[in-house]
Image (spheres, rainbow, N blue to C red):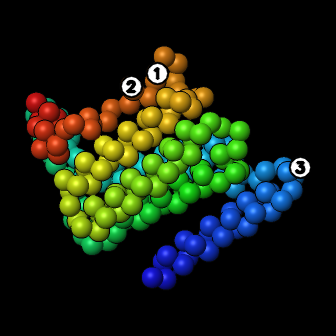
Amino acid sequence: MARHYRHLARLAPLALAGVGLASCGEEPVDLPYGTAQQFMANEVQSTAEVYWNAVGAVSELVDGEPVFREFEPQTDEEWQQVADAAVKMREYGEVLATPAYADGRGDDWMDFAQGLQAVSRQAEQAALDKSPEAVFEVGGTLYNVCTACHQSYPPADLPAGMTVDDIDRPSPDETLEEYRAQDAT
């Protein structure tokens, strides 16, 4: 319970800033995490990676031999880190919905921000349930929300010739077992 109050305390200045800005249309907007691009690069991406990298499978060469390895959180602390990443993603969705980030963007920006919040709630529950399959599946949905937003609001600094579709992520139609089996070959 105290954790939620700490999160609310961090968001309170943003809410107050939004109220203050609504009453003074001439004031410059304070971007608490920098530009949207900076926010994504410095906060959102790294937090999403914690969630996405919690469950999966890899095939690698060890001493010249292919080795297939599955991974998932093993301890209560590791599962809590995954749940905490989901909570942060929800909070970031709330920040993206503030006037500081939403003003001047299309209505779909709010849809994406709300979608991030909704899928992050599912992500948190999957981690709290300690369900690798659910974490994996919700991770695909989280990726889809991010990709849809990036298609409408493309990141400015992707490497030349690369699009968000080039980033290796599981298909939302794949199960964890299918994804792991694909990596085993």
| Label 2 – label 1 distance at C-alpha | 6 Å
Q: Position of residue 25 (x, y in %)?
A: 85, 51
- Which residue corresponds to the image point at 80% horizontal and 57% vertical from the top-left? 21
Above or below 31: residue 149: above
Residue closest to the far bottom: 2
- Which residue corresponds to the image point at 52% horizontal and 60% vertical from the top-left? 91
> Which disc number belongs to residue 166?
2
Mark 2 neighbour density, 10 Å: few (under 14) some (14–19) many (20 or more): few
User: Secondary structure under badge 2?
Assistant: helix
User: Secondary structure under badge 1?
Assistant: loop
Q: Amino acid at mark 2?
A: Asp
Mark 3 neighbour density, 10 Å: few (under 14) some (14–19) many (20 or more): few
Q: Label 3: which residue?
A: 26
Q: Amino acid at mark 1?
A: Met
- Which residue corresponds to the image point at 16% horizontal and 35% vertical from the top-left? 183
Q: Label 1: which residue?
A: 162
Rendered-image quadrant of the C terminus: top left
Asked if the residues shown at circle 2 and circle 1 are in contact, with their CB atoms under 8 angstroms apart, the answer is yes
Q: Position of residue 70 (x, y in %)?
A: 16, 49
Mark earlier in primary sequence (3, 1):
3
Mark earlier in primary sequence (3, 2):
3
